Structure formats: structure tokens, C-alpha cells
Image (cartoon, rainbow, N blue to C red):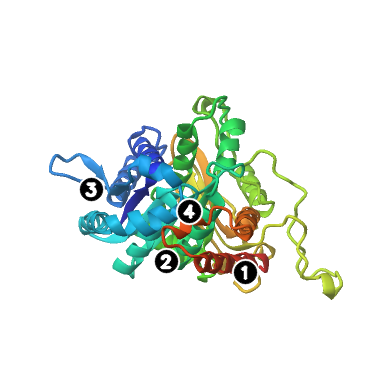
Amino acid sequence: MSIVTIQLGQCGNQIGHEVFNAICGDVHGTHGLCSKKENESYHDACKERFFREEESEVPVARAVLVDMEPKVISQTLSTAASYSVHGPKHKEVIMDLVQREAEKCDRLGGFFTIMSMAGGTGSGLGAFVTQCLRDAFPSSFILNHVIWPYGTGEVIVQNYNSVLTLSHLYQSSDALLVHENDVIHKICAQLMNIKQISFRDVNQVIAHQLGSVFQPTYTAEGGLHYSRNPLGDLMEMLVPHPEFKMLGLRNIPQMPENFLAYSTFSWPGLIKHLRQMLIANAKMEEGIDWQVRPPCLGSSIPSSHSTNKPLHFNTSVANLVILRGKDTHSVDLGSFRDPSLYTSWLNPQDAFNAWKTPRSFNKYEKSAALVSNSQFLLKPLDSVVGKAWNMFASKAYIHQYTKFGIQEEDFLDSFTALEQVISSYSNL
């Protein structure tokens, strides 16, 4: 099944470009480290998923690229202008492009949107387009890839934009896959050893992580065919309830390409690190807090404390581990099936899944990705909502939104919706 990618705004278009670069580099690389037959079926599955062939037989990305005139956006850099003005004004053109791209798919698996949460086009237009997709394709899967803004701030109204965008997306999207700019910046500095970090460096790390999830894998033990519908499989395994649709992504190992030749990794080591990253909510493999432990189920602690989780412990709704490369069939993933990692209302057997392929990814002999529906975003979400509320309480910059038709009631509805999400994840 095919995925139509919709790249929104400057951020979405730049990341989308790097995603397709990473996928092409992976497919055409000579580093598959697997049989020729395996490589060919991987290649075919990838091509059907992300590309179509024109008459010239040149693969063309299944993508729709959307951006507004930059000078218009820079006037306010608010979600309001994009959501209330530019969205409706260009709706017909955008949805016509989407429809045409969808009709070129033999089997449409769903839509993958890439957008910023803080700026102008990506956030406001992204929320508007997602709602239009839901109306036009009610039974298709929609996964929104969202770039969380730097904590220090890129745009003065970024917290307003984030609150409005997230609350709208939560209504119409099947899941939100979130990358935090601050985290990716740290990965560039500490793991990739980049001295002067550019947007392109950040986007390439994001693209590598996305590729490690969406490139073909076997979703069942001993499966003979690559997964046909990655978006559907992802939702089925990670989003068991519509209240919980925030997904985080971690990927190991990550290092400069010229280090790879001198590095060796064992599966037990990678899995041990990945599990501790999950439970300690570490976003990268450097600086993991190894003191964090899962709560002991059925321990002899007095009953009044038996539900207390250790400080900093990250409780999960569901997790998916994706293994690529040599000897994946022999990897022991039992530690991810530990019931103490998960919320009590879901069977741990249903809450954890693994996808595997013997085909390596992007020159890494062995690599592991973790897609997690857990409390990982609680702190950043609480912070954004808190900052936005403080601004709202003093009526700061509200006029930038009301002049485009977004009223104070809309803000209050958005705050209420996100407080509910925070409450749900807090109570896991």
C-alpha cells in the first residue's frame, strides 16, 4: 500500500526533502548486508510505498508540497492567518492535488503530513489540511509528524500556535508522531559531533529516524512478505484508545558516518540501552539515568503506596521495537514485555510488538528504533500549555488571532482539550 506524504510550510518541505533523500540513499546503497532476493523485495516494497513511476520510468515521490508566500506569513507568524484565511482560500487547489496523488495509488494506505507546530504555515495550515483530509478520506489513516518548537522560542506566539494546532490535530488525526527540536539539536551536538549545527543537520537526523520506522519490515515472526500497510499497522499496535495518540521515536545507534567502520554493536547491548531510554524517558543514548527502575509488581510495599510509580519513571500505553540488520531473528525482546512498563488496563502481550528485517538501514549493520506511546511528552506539553495560559491570562497578542476570526472561546476550548490529554497521560 502507498503512503501520500503532505509537506506543509518551510519546515515540512525541508524535512520531507531529507526524508526522501534518506529513503533513496538507503534503497540504492550497496550496504544491504542481505541476500539479493531479500534486497529486491525490500526495494519493491519501498518503491510501492513512497514512489510512483512516470512514463519516463523515473520514480517520483508520492508527495504534495504546500507553502504560502513567505512575506505574508512573516507579518504575524500566527496559526490564525494560516488556519482561518490561507487554508480556506487555497483549500480547493490543495485538496485537488491531494486527490490526484491519492488516485495514482493502486492501494492508498493513508496520509503522512510533516509540519511545524510553532510557525505560520505549518501549524495553522497543517491543522486545516488535516481536517480537510479527515472529511475527504474518512476511512484513511492520517499520521501527523509534528516538530515541537525549541523551548527557548523561535516565535513570540509559538505557545499559542502550539496549543491551537495540537488541539485541532487531536480531533482529526489518528496519531501524532513528535520530534522535539531541542532533542535533535542535542543529538547533532553530542552524538553526531557537529560543531556548527544547521537546520539541514537537524532535518537529516529526523529523516534518518523516520526512515528507520517507515522503510519495509516484516511485522510477524517468520513473515514471508513485507508489511503492506505501515500506517495501519502502526495505529493498530500503538493507538489502542483515541485519548492516547502521542507517539515518540528513539533510534540507536546514531553516530557520524566515518565512525561506523570502527564501531561494533551487539543486540543485547542495543536492547538494554533502548529499554532504559524508554523507562527513564531519555531521548538519546548519552546521559541515560540508569538509576530509574520499573516498579515492583506485587511487592510487599503497603497498599497505600503500591500504585506509586518511582520518580521519573515513564509509563507506556504501547511500544513498538523495529530491528534492522544482522541476526535480528535471534534477538531477545523479553525485557520489553515486562508488565510493570505498561498501564494496568492493557495486556502487556498486546501492548508490545516487534518488527524485523535482515536488511540493514543506512549503513548501520545493526540498528533499533523504538516508537512509544508513553508519558514521554508530558513535561513539554505541560510547559507549553502553562506558558500559553500565562500569556492568555494577560490577553497578550490575542488581537493577532481575533482579527482572523479565532475567538477567546476557541482558546479556552483548546486549553480544555489539552488539559484532558495531560490528565489522561498523567494517570497512566
Looking at the image, residue 175 sits to the left or right of residue 338; the answer is left
Could you say where residue 68 lies in the image, as x and y percent from the top left? 33, 46
Residue 267, above or below 178: above
Which residue is painted at 45% across and 46% down in the image? 77
- Residue type, label 4: Gln
Instruction: Find disc 1 in the rendering and name its residue.
Output: 424
Q: In this orientation, does residue 218 appear? A: no
- Residue type, label 1: Ser
Q: 221 or 202: which is nearer to us? A: 202
Instruction: Find disc 3 in the rendering and name its residue.
Output: 52
Disc 2/disc 4 C-alpha distance (Å)? 25 Å
- Residue type, label 3: Arg
Disc 1/disc 4 C-alpha distance (Å)? 31 Å
Residue 172 location, quadrant:
bottom left
Instruction: Find disc 4 in the rendering and name its residue.
Output: 400
Sequence-wise first label, 2 or 3: 3
Could you say where residue 207 lies in the image, as x and y percent from the top left? 44, 41
For the residue labelled by badge 2, is the local secondary structure a helix, a strand or a loop? helix
Disc 2/disc 1 C-alpha distance (Å)? 18 Å
Residue 421 location, quadrant:
bottom right
- Residue type, label 2: Ser
